[in-house]
Image (cartoon, helix red, strand yellow):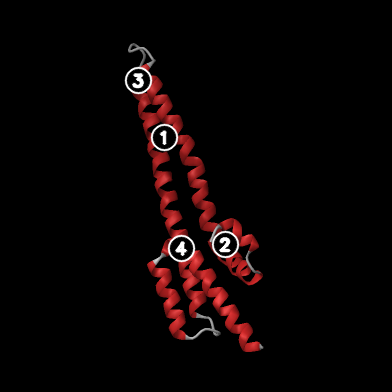
């Protein structure tokens, strides 16, 4: 499901997606913060090392600034790696939340729950689509039971 089409999704789907977003928001904020800091550090250090090596005359002392910029670049790459790890954690947490929500459903039989959970595990890149499909199925079952 396209993130923009979630706004046009039924209210029961929007409510569940909102719960997932609230659950993963702290980790996502940290990941974005790491990314936001890492790119300027990497760019700044690469540009300055290039200028020190290519443009500054050989008579000027260059070793200490190169080491400092290399450390800043390494810090930037470490933050970028940490951001990548946090992004994977956000994805795993979201899928775990979806699995738990599917398991706790009272309107769907166990075989169908297992099928949706298996589908989440097999297609993690399509987790939101599978979850929305489950929510729609659950909603249809609940409304047909009430009629």
- Gap between marks 4 and 3, in whole Å? 47 Å
The secondary element bearing badge 2 is classed as helix
The mark lying in front, picked from 1 and 4, is: 4
Separation of residues labelled 4 and 2 (CA atoms): 16 Å
Q: Which residue is mark 1?
A: 72
Sooner in the amino-acid sequence: mark 2 or mark 3: 2
How far from the left and from the top, in percent, is residue 124? 42, 64
The residue tagged 3 is 53
Which corner quadrant holds the C terminus?
bottom right
Disc number lying in front (4 or 3): 4
Q: Check the image and report above or below for 91 versus 115.
A: above
Front tag of 3 and 1: 3
Q: In percent of the image, x 60 and y 61: which residue is there?
A: 6
Q: Name the residue that disc number 2 marks.
A: 21
Q: Secondary structure at mark 1?
A: helix
Disc 1 residue crowd, few under 14, some 14–19, many 20+, Cα 10 Å? many
How many angstroms separate mark 3 from mark 1 (CA)?
Answer: 16 Å
Q: Residue 88's quadrant in the figure?
A: bottom left
> Marks 2 and 1: in contact by CB < 8 Å?
no
């Amino acid at each position: 499901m396209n993130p923009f089409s979630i706004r046009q999704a039924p209210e029961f789907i929007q409510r569940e997606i909102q719960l997932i977003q609230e659950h993963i928001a702290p980790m996502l904020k940290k990941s974005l913060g790491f990314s936001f800091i890492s790119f300027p550090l990497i760019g700044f250090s690469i540009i300055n090392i290039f200028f020190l090596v290519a443009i500054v005359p050989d008579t000027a002392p260059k070793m200490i600034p190169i080491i400092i910029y290399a450390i800043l670049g390494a810090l930037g790459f470490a933050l970028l790696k940490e951001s990548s790890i946090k992004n994977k954690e956000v994805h795993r947490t979201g899928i775990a939340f979806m699995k738990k929500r599917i398991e706790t459903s009272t309107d769907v039989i166990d075989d169908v729950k297992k099928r949706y959970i298996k589908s989440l595990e097999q297609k993690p890149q399509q987790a939101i689509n599978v979850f929305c499909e489950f929510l729609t199925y659950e909603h249809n079952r609940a409304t047909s039971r009430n009629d």
